Amino acid sequence: MTSTTALEPFGARLRRAMDERGPLCVGIDPHASLLAEWGLEDDVAGLERFSRTVVEAVADRVAVLKPQSAFFERFGSRGVAVLEKSVEEARAAGALVVMDAKRGDIGSTMAAYAESFLREGAPLFSDALTVSPYLGYGSLRPAVDMARESGAGLFVLALTSNPEGGEVQHAVRADGRGVGATMLAHLAAENAGEAPLGSFGAVVGATLGDLSSYDLDINGPLLAPGIGAQGATPADLPRVFGAAVRDVVPNVSRGVLRHGPDQVALRRAADRFAEEIRTAVTAA
């Protein structure tokens, strides 16, 4: 099955959304402890209430929403149904949806993952998908091709903020280039000649400090987890990302979500982060 009507490329849609709404991605991470903080049960009803509240509060004002698929999948088919509805309602409200599923495999299996999340008309179709390239960047080709066909995008794990990531991402190949740097180079090649922004981005942690030794100018977006609860602040972004800071999509999850279930408080938190990020990026 293939898409019959491609959207405008994800990179162009993301650039416009960031310019209009501010460069902020809000995660939807309904893990058990957060449901409890909201006074909700750790069940499908609590999941649905949580997700609907976040979407209703911020989907009409933030550039990107990023549901973490695992927190829905743990409830089985009913949880996935909640995820499908959340994606549909978020996109209808004008937010772009990045599905945080970190899929990665080879051949027909990777193609099936691409069909699930990147084929327009699929129940879980999202504007972009996070993927893992550590079976080799070439293993992602079915997802790259499907994304191009449908107007979607990818965010490839390149320099993640988790401490364990370094043993793979900082490893040095026989040619002297680091693995993380190799992923960035592949993405730059995918995005060559695209305007105003390519559709194939990297995941680069905002908590990593000085990244000046890496070429982050991939002509594509940089999804940056770590703002808020993980310790990074909007003011850190220019120092970490340098000249590429305008293409950064900072992700905030708990820093916004902890203000729920009050929708007004959620909106205020999202607006505050968006403005702080916009100010930091503009001043860079």
Image: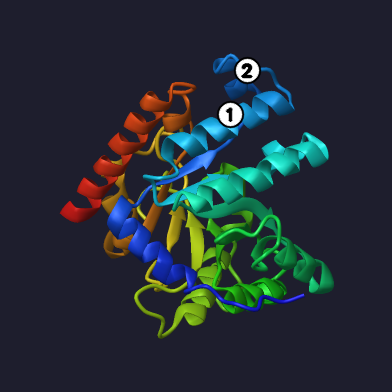
Give the class, few, some or many, for how many residues have Cα within 10 Å of label 1's Cα (few <14, many ≥20): many
Give the structural element (helix, strand or loop) at label 1.
helix
Give the label on residue 228, or none.
none
Residue in view at x 48 percent, y 36 percent: 56
Q: Quadrant of residue 83?
A: top right
- Residue 166, above or below 155: above
Q: How crowded is mark 2: few (under 14 residues within 10 Å), some or many (20 or more)?
A: some
- Horizontally, residue 42 falls left or right of residue 278, namely right
Q: Do the residues labelled 1 and 2 touch (CB within 8 Å)?
A: yes
How many numbered discs? 2
Q: In the rendered view of the protein, which quadrant contains the C terminus?
A: bottom left
Residue wearing tag 2: 40
Q: Position of residue 21 (x, y in %)?
A: 32, 51
Q: Could you tell whether 77 is left or right of 65 in the image?
A: right
Question: Where does label 1 land, which residue?
Answer: 50
Quadrant holding the N terminus: bottom right
Above or below, 119 against 270 in this view is below
* SS for callout 2: loop
Image position, residue 103 (x, y; %): 70, 58
| Rendering coords of residue 234 (x, y %) | 30, 42
Question: In the visual, does 117 lie left or right of 258?
Answer: right
